[in-house]
Image (cartoon, rainbow, N blue to C red):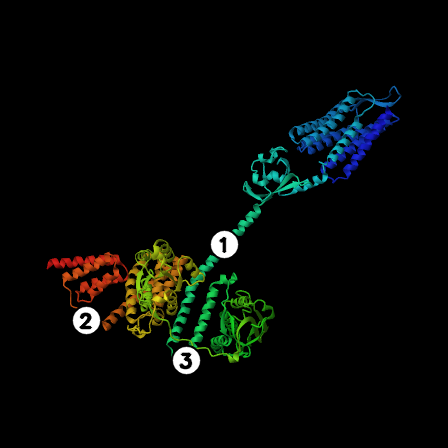
Amino acid sequence: MVNIVILLEFLGISLIVIALILLLNGEGAREQKLLIFIMCGSLVQNVGYLLELRAPTVEAAMTALIVENVGSTFVPLFYCWFIYIYCYVTPPRALLRILGAIGFLSLLTVFFDRYGLFYREVQWVADANGFYHVDISYGPLYAFFLFSRIIVPYTLCMLTLIHAVRERSDKQVNRQYFTILGISTLPVIVLIAYVCKLANVYDFTPVTLAISMSMVVIVVWSRRNYDFRHLAAEKVLESMGDGVIALDAHDRLVSYNRAAADIFTCLPAHKLGENIRVVEDFKEEMLSEDAPWSFSINGQHYESHSKHIKDENGKVQGCVILILDMTDIKAYINEIKRVRRQAEKASIAKSEFLANMSHEIRTPMNAIIGMNEIIMEESEDTEICNYARDVQSAAKSLLAIINDILDLSKVEAGKMELVNVNYYLKDMADEIIGMMDMAASQQGLILKYECDETIPCRYKGDDGRIKQILINILSNAIKFTKKGYVRAYITGKPGENENEELLAFHVEDTGCGIREEDLDKIFEDFRQVDSKRNRSAEGTGLGLAIVKNLVELMKGTIKVESTYGKGTIVTITIPQEIVDKQPVSQMPEAPQVERKMTDMFTAPGVKVLIVDDNVINRKVARGFLKNYSFDLDEAESGPEAIELVRATRYDLIFMDHMMPGMDGIEAVEIIRTKCGENGTAPVIVALTANAMEGMRELFLEHGFQDFIAKPLDRRELNRLLLRQVPEKYRQSTDAESESRPLNPEAFRIDGVDMNVAMQYYSGDEAGFVDLLDLYCADGKRKTRLLCELVESDILRYQIEVHGLKSASANIGAMDVSNIARAQENAAAQGEREFILEQFPLLMAKYETLLANIEQFLEKYRQDNDVKEKLPGIPIGELRKQTETALEELKHFRSRECAEKVEAILLHELPKEMQERFGQIQEQLRLYEDDNAEELLGQVIGILKEEENQK
């Protein structure tokens, strides 16, 4: 019998070795290590029992028994831990640690058994076959350690396996659990039989344990559901910050990592094998493989991505859901959006600033261009006219540059566009040299100029941009050259095809030069190199940056060579299309420019409406338009204009942009949509002082057809009218005006610059007198209104000083206009302290100006009123005429009423009546119809009393 037992032991040991070989070929996961510890302990236990079977003496048998106990001490505990992990159940770590400590103490009692506490009695006996073995009676400590070291761990194993079988719905997994449960039960049964002396001589527990543990390893390994590489991957998943959930083909929960449990906090409360849809906060859309799904839980933002897992046959076995924490990314995106909004606000603020600067810069430029136009029109001297043409060209080039600088966004966005036209190279060059020669002379420099006369004479390209480039380069050369010369020369060579020429513009100077390390910096925005040395040289540092952009836009190149302290050579090469291959030396003579403004016309019967809240601006517009013989009407507000359009079909409407209450854009939208054919038929032109880039597009988008800047320019207005008045209505005229021309020398008024007034006013002397009269009449109202609004209504105050600015500029009162402009800008910025500080100065200047104008008008009328008054009108007739005038006004025929009042004033009247009718006339001129109606009623009442007294 003993030999059979020994053979069984060898079999058990062999199985253990095979199991260890399998385990040692794994990936070294925690569960693998537990099985290795179990198999090693079982190996030691079986070797110890084999030694016990072969022991010749009782001492040798007891030593073998110690080896056997050492091997078996921790096997149940490690097996219990393994079963917990294998069944996906959280182990009771505290209890297992206590059992481990008890197991360690049991080893000490095995080695140092005192007082028979562990082994009560040990005997060396022989069985019937003469086989000697130890016969042991166990003490109380053995019973305690048997319970804590073996019974409790194996009981926990059984309960865990039974629980797993009951909880899992997967039949294949349950069969595995049943198999392991059955295998695990065998060593327990055999141990109970040995302890209870059912087997007296031989202990089959070690070999049974060896076979059982080996079978567990083999079953698990063969089933391949315990792949240690998978465990290693699980380790990685556990350490991930993103959630991972694995589902089977029926969307049942297979596994998840710690991050997923942190996201779906209720996930641990659900059992593996449950359908994922029962998990709170889980949405059906997360299972879609088509697109990621975004969701939020407890203020955190997540994004789920689902991926199907297919077998080698393409059948879907399940899916993995990856849940990314997008909270930080979303916060970053929101921060980017916030910064973008701030940038957009900054861009809007920049645009508003540039819009305000547009007023300040364009006003003097318009004056320069306008006065120069008068010189060109009226000069009979060819040389002076040529000088004026140079001034005109320079001024327009400067204005074009100012427009580009004001619209910096166009440069930054790369939206600068080229306008290609045919031009003569020598004419363009002569024009540029003519502009720059004066600047060079003022610096005491010689401006040398050469042009290769063998190159073609005419090209197609954007000559305006080329002028801008060369003016900029020449200006810099003159600016930074203290003595010597500046030389410009033009050469060319054939381009890529026969119709292309590579024009090379060279600018050489003997100035201060540029350091080699600064050559790459000169094209940076707002950068001026060597600023300490060049402190006296004015400039924004933007010019060369614009030059570089323009050259590159025209597919050209710019090259700078410089020797510090000696001078600089700038070479610009630009490809241009050849239009005329004749050499420059044979270029035809250009025709003389027409000096007088041509294409003047009249258009009787064309109905024109002028809409402006400022009476002076309306008067100026009427003065510009009266020579065209239009049928003119006026409105002082958007609502009034709407009513007039509903009643009358106009051909042309000039609409002011900035008006109180309803601005021009709002008024036009209502006219276009709610006034029927009367609203859709007329051409509507925007009147505005805002000449920023983009304003034309704004107006065109809102129902306007054209745009003209204020102050009005006669030539621009005439061009606009030629565009917008149909030719069938136009009658050409060369007749001189019969009216008395305006003589500036006759209007010497302190505070009024007639040179400026002549730029803005094109009417006759009588019209200008009426304009001054209206300015004074409006001033009486405006002074009171400004005093009321300055502290109570800043918005209306801004609108009123805006009107005062324009009206004062129209009569040449630039001091008042400039102060009003400063007040308008301060109101726009909300700078109340500045407004209140400067308001007394504005009122003092304004009231003084009004007094000066009134004094002049009184003297003017005395000197020019040579007409005799008509005989007086009887009281009854006067009352009837006054009632007729009132009736006209009540029926909204203010023009007819004004004519009646003017006719009455031609007669001799008592002084009081003269003053009253004068007040009525003044109110009608100011379009204060309600006040005029009230005054007419008072006059009628006085006249009735006088009739009754007689």
Instruction: Give the CA distance from mark 3 to mark 2.
Output: 48 Å
| Residue of label 2 | 868
Q: What residue is pinned by disc 1?
A: 342
- Give the class, few, some or many, for how many residues have Cα within 10 Å of label 2's Cα (few <14, many ≥20): few
SS for callout 3: helix
Q: Nearest the camera: 199 or 844?
A: 199
Locate residue 391, reporting x and y percent.
44, 74
Real-space Cα separation, disc 1 to disc 3, in angstroms: 56 Å
Residue at x-position 50% and y-position 56%:
343
Q: Name the residue carrying label 3.
A: 382
Given the image, on which type of amino acid does mark 1 rest? Gln
How far across and down, in percent of the image, does residue 90 sit? 66, 33
Of labels 1 and 3, the one closer to you: 3
Q: Split into 4 quadrants, where in the image is the N terminus? A: top right
Residue 712, image x and y in percent?
Answer: 37, 66
Question: Residue 536 or 719: which is nearer the viewer?
Answer: 719
